[in-house]
Amino acid sequence: MIFSKILINWYLKNKRDLPWRNTTEPYKVWLSEIMLQQTRVAQGMPYYLSFLNEFPSVFDLAEASQEKVLKLWQGLGYYSRARNLHETAKYVASELNGKFPENYTELKKLKGVGDYTAAAIASICFNEAVPVVDGNVYRVLSRYFNIETPINSGSGNKEFKALAAELLDKENPSLFNQGLMEFGALQCKPKNPLCETCPFNEACLALKYDKIQGLPVKLKKTKVKKRYFNYLVFASEDNKTLLQQRIGKGIWEGLYEFPLVETPAPVEEHSLISEEKFKEIVGNKPVEINIYNEAPIVHKLSHQHIYARFWLVQIKELKGKAVSLKNIRKYPVPVLIQNFLEESDFDDYC
């Protein structure tokens, strides 16, 4: 029996009952594919259900404020996905009358939709014969065919995409693509794959040559950058604090955080108050400063590790854009800030 038939038979017997599997509605499939990029199903599921409950249609999502979208996305990470999701919803609602493009080429023109997502939507919703290649697919194909080409290289991308296209069941692209992804998630797992019960175990070259754990091959990541964040957590006598919105194209764009003094290395109080940024934020106002966490909280992102310390700043009065402590949880914040709020009960001081 050929590869595609074995795979589809396995999928029909073993697929998980997931909400986005029971629909071919482009909006719902698109939403699930964007959310599950670099996110485990167990983590993404509650977010998917919350979004559908809050935004049943692309028009509802388009009409929402960015802050509301980011707040619902809070904790899922890679926030550019949420911003792109919102922009695409507005485009589809206003320019396409709520109707998603019906082919891979046009889908790929949408903001935040790359090769993989466009192929997934096109095959699942419109049965277009285009291959999907994600982390699961790389793993299955590299092991089955014993391919050592690095998956995060240009040549690897081309090789695996061509191979997936060759294997694709042209009559059942939806079942094949979903089956291949599901097979990588459940059977051909990164660690402890279920080789003994695998329907391909007699033909799998990695199993034959004892190379399961060594495949797929991935080029080493770029060096991780270390950053040192000092958050100034203000609390005034009338129970207000300060939040600022991150702008620009760096991490957490559009999210809110406490006033930040970034330093090239860890600092103590005397060094912190001598920083120009600290003076700019605090000015000449009398304040009382206490460190909340002596040991930095390490927050790891893909290419950078953030070492965060929170400084509690008592002040008589805050003017301008001060935020009431009772309203602080209404703002979308990075998970680093969210964890601080939950652990410290800071907003319960009011």
Image (cartoon, rainbow, N blue to C red):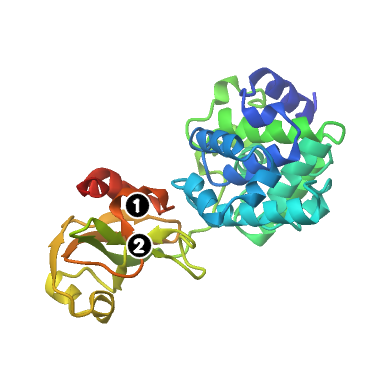
Q: Nearer the viewer, residue 57 or 134?
A: 57
Q: Which mark is residue 243?
A: 2
Up the image or down, 130 lies above or below 224; here it is above
Q: Where residue 174 sits: x, y (%)? A: 77, 34
Name the residue rendered at 24%, 75% in the picture.
278
Identify which amino acid the numbered label 2 is placed on. Leu
Which quadrant of the structure image shows residue 26? Answer: top right
Name the residue rendered at 63%, 26% in the picture.
201
Q: Secondary structure at mark 1?
A: helix
* Quadrant (top left, top right, bottom left, bottom right) of the N terminus: top right
Identify which amino acid the numbered label 1 is placed on. Ile
Which sits earlier in the primary sequence, circle 2 or circle 1? 2
Q: Where residue 39 sits: x, y (%)? A: 52, 43
- Whether the residues at callouts 2 and 1 have beta carbons within 8 Å, the answer is yes
Q: Residues within 10 Å of mark 2 (few under 14, many from 20)?
A: many
Q: Answer yes or no: is residue 167 visible.
A: no
Up the image or down, 252 lies above or below 173; here it is below
Q: Where residue 110 sits: x, y (%)? A: 73, 56
Q: Nearer the viewer, residue 339 or 53?
A: 53
Residue position marked by numbered label 1 in the rendering: 328
Q: Nearer the viewer, residue 64 or 193?
A: 64
Q: Is residue 49 left or right of residue 348?
A: right
Name the residue rendered at 18%, 80% in the picture.
284
Name the residue rendered at 68%, 51% in the picture.
89
Q: Residues within 10 Å of mark 1 (few under 14, many from 20)?
A: some
Q: Secondary structure at mark 2?
A: loop
Q: Where residue 239 sits: x, y (%)? A: 23, 55
